[in-house]
Image: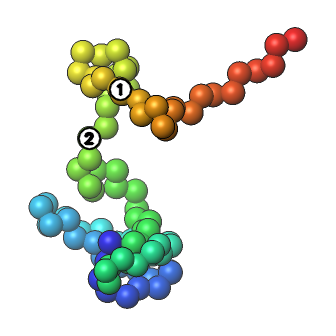
Amino acid sequence: MLKEMVVEGQVLTLKHNRTTEEISCTVMNMGPTTNGVMEVGVEFSKPNPKFWRVSFPPDDWTPHSAEAKPVTFNPRNPPLLKPQPAKK
C-alpha cells in the first residue's frame, strides 16, 4: 500500500522498517485506491525470500501436526472440493 503515485515499470527502493534492509524492485501492477492509498504489486530485482521475515511451515508439516490449528468451516462458504475423475 502506497500513498505516493507510481507507474508500472517504475523502479523503487523498499526499506524494511524493522531491519533497515533495502531492496530494489519494479512496480508490476497497481490495484484499487482506498482512502488515498494505492495497492501496488512489486517484483524484486533479485530474489530475496527472507526480506519480509515471514515464516512458512516446514516441508514436513501436515494438518495433523500437533502445532496445527483446527479448521472450522462456514456453512455459507463451504470449502472447494477437487473434481474427481469420472468413473469408467
Q: Which mark is residue 4?
A: none
Considering every residue shown, the one lying at the far bottom of the view is 5
| Residue 68, visible in the rendered structure | yes
Say which amino acid is labelled 2: Ser
| Residue 45, visible in the rendered structure | no
Q: Quadrant of the N terminus?
A: bottom left
How far apart are the two marked residues, 2 and 1, measured between alpha carbons?
Answer: 20 Å
Q: Which of these two is toward me, 79 or 4?
A: 79
Left or right: 8, with 47 as reference point: right
Instruction: State yes or no: discs 2 and 1 in contact (Cβ < 8 Å).
Output: no
Indicate the position of residue 62 as horizontal and vertical percent values: 37, 20
Q: Quadrant of residue 41?
A: bottom left
Indicate the position of residue 71 as horizontal and vertical percent values: 35, 26
Say which amino acid is labelled 1: Val
Q: Quadrant of the C terminus?
A: top right
Considering every residue shown, the one lying at the far right of the view is 88
Considering every residue shown, the one lying at the far top of the view is 88
Task: Give the colour scheme of this rendering.
Answer: rainbow
Classify mark 1: helix, strand or loop: loop
Residue at the image point whose x is 42% and y is 34% from the top? 74
Q: Which residue is mark 2?
A: 55
Residue at the image point whose x is 34% and y is 15% from the top? 64
Q: Which of these two is toward me, 72 or 53?
A: 72
Indicate the position of residue 80 as horizontal and vertical percent values: 56, 33
Residue at the image point whose x is 49% and y is 38% from the top? 77
Considering every residue shown, the one lying at the far left of the view is 18
The relative height of residue 53 versus residue 46 in the rendered view (above or below) is: above
Q: Which residue is mark 1?
A: 71
> Which is nearer the N-term, disc 2 or disc 1?
2
Classify mark 2: helix, strand or loop: loop
Left or right: 84, with 12 as reference point: right
Residue at the image point whose x is 51% and y is 32% from the top? 79
